[in-house]
Every structure is written in structure tokens, then in C-alpha cells.
Image (spheres, rainbow, N blue to C red):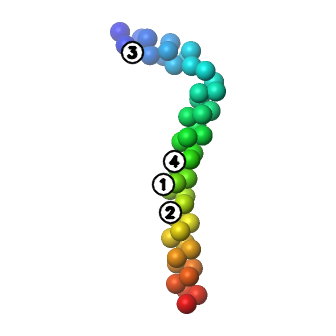
Amino acid sequence: MFALTFPLQAQQQNPASFWIMMGLLMVVFYFFMIRPQQKKAKDARKFRES
């Protein structure tokens, strides 16, 4: 029963809420994946230069 009603509910969502969720996902991705990788690369660069 729920499997039949879920797609109907998903189609009725506001398009703005989709973009808000995508933005939040990108922020989380940045702070947990990209930023630590940049910090690691910066530390490695400092280590090579010294």
C-alpha cells in the first residue's frame, strides 16, 4: 500500500525543496570530502617544501 502512494507523494513536492536539498547535499559533500582532501594536499605540499 505504501509503495503505491510514495511515488504520488514524491511528485507533489515543491521544486524549490529539491534544489534546497541538492544544495545541502553539496555543502555536506564539500565539508566531508573536498575540504579534508584540500587540507591533506596542503600539508603534503608543506612537507615537500620543507
**Separation of marks 4 and 1 at Cα, in angstroms:** 6 Å
Question: Sequence-wise, which precedes: disc 2 or disc 3?
Answer: 3
Residue ID at (58%, 87%): 49
User: Which amino acid lies under the numbered mark 2 shown in the image of this protein?
Assistant: Pro
Q: Which residue is mark 1?
A: 32
**Separation of marks 1 and 3 at Cα, in angstroms:** 33 Å
The answer to whether mark 1 and mark 3 are in CB contact below 8 A is no
Question: Sequence-wise, which precedes: disc 4 or disc 2?
Answer: 4
User: Which amino acid lies under the numbered mark 1 shown in the image of this protein?
Assistant: Phe
Q: Which residue is mark 2?
A: 36
Label 1 crowding class (10 Å Cα cut-off): few <14, some 14-19, many 20+?
A: few
The answer to whether mark 2 and mark 1 are in CB contact below 8 A is yes
Q: Position of residue 31 (x, y in %)?
A: 52, 54
Residue ID at (56%, 82%): 46
Q: Nearer the viewer, mark 2 or mark 3?
A: 2
Question: Sequence-wise, which precedes: disc 1 or disc 3?
Answer: 3
Q: Which residue is mark 4?
A: 28
Residue ID at (57%, 45%): 26
- Find numbered disc 4 in the image and state the secondary structure of the residue it sits on: helix
Residue ID at (50%, 15%): 9
**Separation of marks 2 and 3 at Cα, in angstroms:** 39 Å
Q: Nearer the viewer, mark 3 or mark 4?
A: 4
Q: Which residue is mark 3?
A: 3
User: Which amino acid lies under the numbered mark 4 shown in the image of this protein?
Assistant: Val
The answer to whether mark 4 and mark 1 are in CB contact below 8 A is yes
Label 2 crowding class (10 Å Cα cut-off): few <14, some 14-19, many 20+?
A: few
Q: Position of residue 30 (x, y in %)?
A: 55, 53
